[in-house]
Image (spheres, helix red, strand yellow):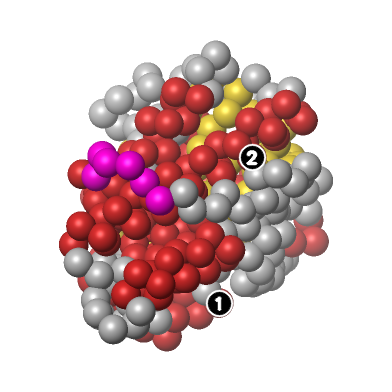
Amino acid sequence: MLCLGIETSCDETSCAVVADGRRILSNVIASQVSSHAVYGGVVPELASRLHISIIVPILKESLFEAGVSLREIDLVGVTSGPGLIGSLLVGVEFAKALAYALGKPLVPVHHVAAHLYAPFLLEKESGATTQEFDYPYLGLVVSGGHSSLVYVHDPLHYEVIGRTLDDAAGEAFDKVAKLLGLGYPGGPIIDRLSHEWNAGYINFPRPGVRSEDCDLSFSGLKTAVVRYVREKTKGERPLDAEEQKHIAASFQTAVIDTLLTKSERAIVMTGAGRVAIVGGVACNMGLRDEARRRLDGITFHIPSPILCTDNAAMVAGLAWHVYHAGSLTRHSFSDGARIATLTLNADANLPIV
Ligand code: KG4
Ligand code: ZN
């Protein structure tokens, strides 16, 4: 069964074709980063307009790469939230029109749940890498909008162990990079600088690591960096390149330590034997290395970077499971055309069943 996935929740326009919920036939992603970089962050209105202008060519490319025609698609899955409301609207309306025209079912997919499905996808060129991974598992979701710890029972059942209290990990990376004058998006830039820097570091706080819970908060750490920079420069001079690297690497070390300390606590609390890290921040080389070191002894997986950042393959894969589980109630389909009545929700919680 071929599922077409559509993802437009933020600043990536993506269409993918996935066979039987696992095998990626194509996963085409158009990033808008260069258009937003001049503004130092994502401009929602601009993001929506760019999705509109590029979504048809991205669909065509994804079908071409998969070697299938639109008529061969059996199912359409689309991210329905959470995300930027205007961006979501473009993908959802596009998916609805497609599903209606093809007479195929449409499945709304939760964005964070889709990230948590990434460990199960088989990539075209290296199909064997993820076959070992299984449910249940503890997922650390670290993206621009979320840093949460979720116990994933199966593709449809989630238990939130730790919540995003304020700034998400990716958001903190982006804001700190902006403060240091490094550009946008901050995560990959700080990651690169941190790798270059191997001297001692500033001991920034690890927010909330002493509390008993697994919730994640990064706004305090961001404020600590702001204070440090103010003190250092007295507001009278820019930071030099060495100072930028030093602060970036120290900030990254604090984020990684916080994420892994909370993950270790969640492992103890849940007794999880498997862990995966997903979302854009899971691309971080320092986090990948340190997680491998600290989580030694348990089955552990981080998807390849292309499946960590926003992509439609994870949406198509999860849509297949949702469809087959029949968890779309009759009520959620309009008569005859089998089109789901989608509720757009920019702040939707995970679908805990
Ligand atoms: O999952 P994602 O593509 O979109 C959301 O759902 O938010 O994550 C985007 C976030 C951005 O904040 C970006 O700075 C961060 O992921 N990111 C990274 C790295 N690559 C992307 N953060 C740290 N290190 C990286 N290498
Ligand atoms: Zn995402």
Q: Tell me which residue sits at (34%, 65%) in the image.
A: 177
User: Residue 160, position in %: x, y?
Assistant: 73, 46
- In magenta, the rendered stretch is 197-202
**Is 183 drawn above or below residue 61 in the view shown?**
below
Magenta span dominant secondary structure: loop
**Local SS, label 1:** helix
- Frontmost of labels 2 and 1 is 2
**In front of the other: 88 or 3:** 88
When asked about the image quadrant of residue 212, the answer is: top right
Magenta-drawn stretch contains 101: no
Cβ of mark 2 under 8 A from ligand 1: no
User: Quick check: can you spot residue 161?
Assistant: yes
Compared across the picture, whether 45 is left or right of 241 comes to right
- Closer to the chain start, of discs 2 and 1, is 1
Contact check, label 2 and label 1, Cβ < 8 Å: no
Q: Tell me which residue sits at (62%, 72%) in the image.
A: 346
Q: Which residue is mark 1?
A: 85
Kind of residue sitting beneath label 1: Ile
Compared across the picture, whether 96 is left or right of 288 comes to right
Q: Which mark is residue 139?
A: none
Kind of residue sitting beneath label 2: Lys
Q: Which residue is mark 2?
A: 262
User: Residue 180, position in %: x, y?
Assistant: 31, 69
